Image (cartoon, rainbow, N blue to C red):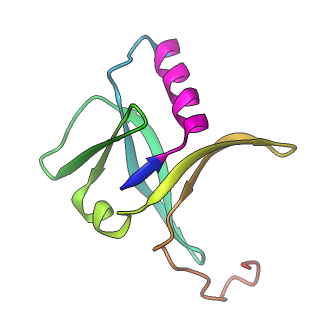
Amino acid sequence: MIEVTDKAAAELKSLLEQEGKPDLALRIFVAGVACSGIQYGLAFDDELKEDDVTMESNGIKLVMAKEIERNFSEGSIDFIEDENGKGFLIRNPSAGGGCGTCGGCH
């Protein structure tokens, strides 16, 4: 199960209200692969595909393709604000990574 934290849920609900589309789902997708592992992205979506898996966490409907769900069955989506800015943080403990080839990963 993917957990949407209270802070992330509040921010997502606010964004949905601003868009005037409170029924949209939050789609999790693969945005790329780096030496730290799979990088995920988020986008609002109103279409379900045949191979989609849906779930709900903290009042937010989540949608993702089955192959993503197999590799991202546990994790969290959080919202952070610090001196560097603000944004959503996706944590996937089963993502692995850290191949050591880029020189900048720790």
Residue extending farthest left:
50
Residue extending farthest bottom:
100
| Residues in magenta, as a range | 4-18
Q: Nearer the viewer, residue 97 or 74?
A: 74
39 displayed left or right of 59: right
Which secondary structure dominates the residues rendered in magenta? Answer: helix
The image quadrant where one finds the C terminus is: bottom right
Vertical arrangement, residue 78 with respect to residue 18, above or below: below
Residue 95 shown in magenta: no
Identify the residue at horizontal 43%, vertical 36% (top origin): 58
The image quadrant where one finds the N terminus is: bottom left
Residue extending farthest right:
83
Identify the residue at horizontal 54%, vertical 43% (top origin): 5
Vertical arrangement, residue 58 with respect to residue 100, above or below: above
Give coordinates of residue 11: x percent, y percent: 58, 28
Vertical arrangement, residue 93 with respect to residue 63, above or below: below
Give coordinates of residue 82: x percent, y percent: 82, 43
Residue 17 shown in magenta: yes
Give coordinates of residue 68: x percent, y percent: 32, 62
Identify the residue at horizontal 41%, vertical 62% (top origin): 74
Give coordinates of residue 34: x percent, y percent: 56, 72
Vertical arrangement, residue 31 with respect to residue 57, above or below: below
Q: How many marks?
A: 0
Q: Quadrant of residue 49?
A: top left
88 displayed left or right of 83: left
